């Protein structure tokens, strides 16, 4: 499903017409968020979105796990596995495919052990039976079942909180003030536009620290991709962010194709993209998440083999202050 463009524009007729439904949805979401979660047997750091998709939460979760690994800790990711068929709890293994566990867990598992579980409490219990020191949740900010030691709300600098309305009138997953009351900090990813600044100001008004971060493409892959015009394609929440990253990295994109978030590519999609790239003499370039969804499907093997990715890493500004915040909240030496 594609997000409606009006979510990211000033409130207009569509948002006003959907306001009654948004009020009902927001009230239900707010009631759910007020429930008290159960404590896990390990510290829990949750990285989630205030809005629907595109905030950089998965790179942020990976960055948190890398900080823990650097400190000698043993983090394990806990994620719902959106788009996968397995309910779990199940550990993501190297042979797993996106159809089984979803695309994001495949990326997480490259950094640290990853458990997929729709029942987050059951997933946390499975992790606690192992040798982990800390649970890093990718998503779950709005899931009240587990009490979080750190609830980190990721906010995209370009899109921010959009029109500031709740689904379906806007992109917010629940009323902003209710979500911020359950968060412990906001992580602003990228240069902030006005919508993001509104969200950051609201967080500070609630007494929350606001940390900043940026997504940086890996230099070795940039050098490899710079020599040939690209056909860029992406099925993520905000394809324009990926295209803009390519442009900032100096990679010329002669053609761009956008698909809905978590798009399941078809054989016809593959044929069309390959044919267009061949016609223009273009290099196929996509995101790590998209490539993860291509792999393991024989009908998409040719597209996968022809496609290159531009990996990005999330770099946290004032990292020492961020680590001190995590240590204060969890008691762990991060």
Image (cartoon, rainbow, N blue to C red):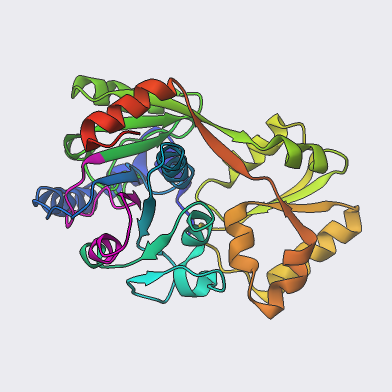
The region drawn magenta spans 123-150
For this orientation, the residue located farthest to the bottom is 298
Residue 146 image position (x, y, % from top left): 18, 54
- Say if 67 sits above or below 309 in the image: above
Of residues 84 and 268, which is closer to you in this image? 84
Q: Residue at x 82, y 52 (%)?
A: 283
Res 194 visible: no
Left or right of 288 on screen, residue 309: right
**Does 118 lie within the magenta span?**
no
Q: Residue at x 58, y 66 (%)?
A: 293
Left or right of 296 on screen, residue 12: left
Res 254 visible: yes
Of residues 14 and 276, which is closer to you in this image? 276
Residue 198 image position (x, y, % from top left): 33, 24
Quadrant housing the C terminus: top left
Left or right of 31 on screen, residue 163: right
**Does 127 lie within the magenta span?**
yes
- Say if 98 sits above or below 246 in the image: below
Of residues 47 and 83, which is closer to you in this image? 47
Residue 225 image position (x, y, % from top left): 80, 43
Q: Residue at x 22, y 51 (%)?
A: 42
Residue 48 image position (x, y, % from top left): 34, 45
Callout count: 0
């Amino acid at each position: 499903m594609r997000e409606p463009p009006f979510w990211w524009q000033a409130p207009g007729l569509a948002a006003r017409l959907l306001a009654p439904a948004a009020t009902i949805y927001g009230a239900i979401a707010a009631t759910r968020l007020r429930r008290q979660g159960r404590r896990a047997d390990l510290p829990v750091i949750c990285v989630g979105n205030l809005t629907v998709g595109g905030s950089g939460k998965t790179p942020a979760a990976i960055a948190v796990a890398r900080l823990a690994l650097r400190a000698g800790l043993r983090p394990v990711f806990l994620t719902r596995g959106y788009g996968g068929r397995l309910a779990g709890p199940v550990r993501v293994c190297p042979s797993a495919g996106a159809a089984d566990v979803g695309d994001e867990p495949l990326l997480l598992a490259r950094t640290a052990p990853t458990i997929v579980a729709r029942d987050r409490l059951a997933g946390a219990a499975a992790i606690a039976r192992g040798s982990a020191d800390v649970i890093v949740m990718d998503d779950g900010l709005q899931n009240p079942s587990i009490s979080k030691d750190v609830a980190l709300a990721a906010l995209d600098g370009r899109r921010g909180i959009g029109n500031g309305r709740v689904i379906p009138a806007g992109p917010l997953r629940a009323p902003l003030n209710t979500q911020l009351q359950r968060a412990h900090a906001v992580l602003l990813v990228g240069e902030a536009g006005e919508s993001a600044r509104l969200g950051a100001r609201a967080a500070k008004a609630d007494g929350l620290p606001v940390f900043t971060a940026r997504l940086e493409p890996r230099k070795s892959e940039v050098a490899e991709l710079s020599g040939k015009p690209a056909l860029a394609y992406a099925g993520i929440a905000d394809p324009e962010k990926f295209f803009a990253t390519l442009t900032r990295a100096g990679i010329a994109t002669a053609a761009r194709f956008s698909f809905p978030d978590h798009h399941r590519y078809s054989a016809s999609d593959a044929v069309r993209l390959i044919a267009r790239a061949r016609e223009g003499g273009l290099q196929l370039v996509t995101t790590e998440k998209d490539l993860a969804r291509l792999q393991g499907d024989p009908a998409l093997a040719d597209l996968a083999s022809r496609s290159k990715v531009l990996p990005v890493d999330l770099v946290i500004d004032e990292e020492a202050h961020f680590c001190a915040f995590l240590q204060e909240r969890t008691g762990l030496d991060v």
